[in-house]
């Protein structure tokens, strides 16, 4: 049957840029999904899970999802139609996971994102712009947010960067 039977959506602009064309969708749900969070956590990659709050946050594609007991937040929304589609998909996904919970080992693990400065220390720091960004600091930030991959830095593919590349991969990048 599923855990969530109904939801409503409210779009808002980022507080730092009230004229933004990009929105955040706040999806109010009719069920407390606290007990489902460890099961959802077991099915997503690189999720930050804080059971004591409780909150589960992860990024998929260009969207960040944050699940709380009675709310799902979705970032980087361009219009209400997209919000409705993504909200329907995540609600169906949560319900499917909850219905299959006997088949899923719940996970209370949390992925800790590497810190930007720790990433920067391992980059070539040439500011060559071959990755498409102005500085290695910007690239490090983009890596930390899963917006780019290590392969986007041509300098890292050189023989002199093998150890740095291995260390960056060990960080989960």
Image (spheres, rainbow, N blue to C red):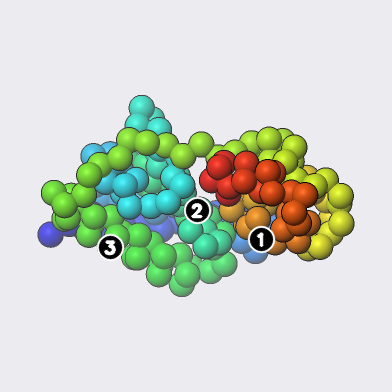
Identify the residue at horizontal 44%, vertical 45% (top origin).
Answer: 47
Residue pointed to by mark 2:
59
Crowding at label 2, few (<14), some or many (≥20) Cα neighbours within 10 Å?
some
Residue 94 visible (yes or no):
yes
CB atoms of marks 1 and 2 within 8 Å? no
Of 37 and 105, the residue lying toward us: 105
Task: Tell me the CA gap for discs 3 and 1.
Answer: 34 Å
**Quadrant in which the N terminus is drawn:** bottom left
10 to 54, vertically: above or below:
below
Label 2 or label 3, whichever lies nearer to me, is 2
Residue pointed to by mark 1:
151
Identify the residue at horizontal 76%, vertical 56% (top origin).
Answer: 158
Crowding at label 1, few (<14), some or many (≥20) Cα neighbours within 10 Å?
few
Left or right: 9 as drawn, with respect to 145 = left
Of 134 and 52, the residue lying toward us: 134
Task: Tell me the CA gap for discs 1 and 2.
Answer: 19 Å
Quadrant of residue 113 within the rendered picture: top right
Residue 11 visible (yes or no):
no
Q: Residue furthest bottom?
A: 81
> In the image, which disc is placed on residue 170?
none
CB atoms of marks 3 and 1 within 8 Å? no
Task: Tell me the CA gap for discs 2 and 3.
Answer: 18 Å
Left or right: 109 as drawn, with respect to 98 = right
126 to 5, vertically: above or below:
above
């Amino acid at each position: 049957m599923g855990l969530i039977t109904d939801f409503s959506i409210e779009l808002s602009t980022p507080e730092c840029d009230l004229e933004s064309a990009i929105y955040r969708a706040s999806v109010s749900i009719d069920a407390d999904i606290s007990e489902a969070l460890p099961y959802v956590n077991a099915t997503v990659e690189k999720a930050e899970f804080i059971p004591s709050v409780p909150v589960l946050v992860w990024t998929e594609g260009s969207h960040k999802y944050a699940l709380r007991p009675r709310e799902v937040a979705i970032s980087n929304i361009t219009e209400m139609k997209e919000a409705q589609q993504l909200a329907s998909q995540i609600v169906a996904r949560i319900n499917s996971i909850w219905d299959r919970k006997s088949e899923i080992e719940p996970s209370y693990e949390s992925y800790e994102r590497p810190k930007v400065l720790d990433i920067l220390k391992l980059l070539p720091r040439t500011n060559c712009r071959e990755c498409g960004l102005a500085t290695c600091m910007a690239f490090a930030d983009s890596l930390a947010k899963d917006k780019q991959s290590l392969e986007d830095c041509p300098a890292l593919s050189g023989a002199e960067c093998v150890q740095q590349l291995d260390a960056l991969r060990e960080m989960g990048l």
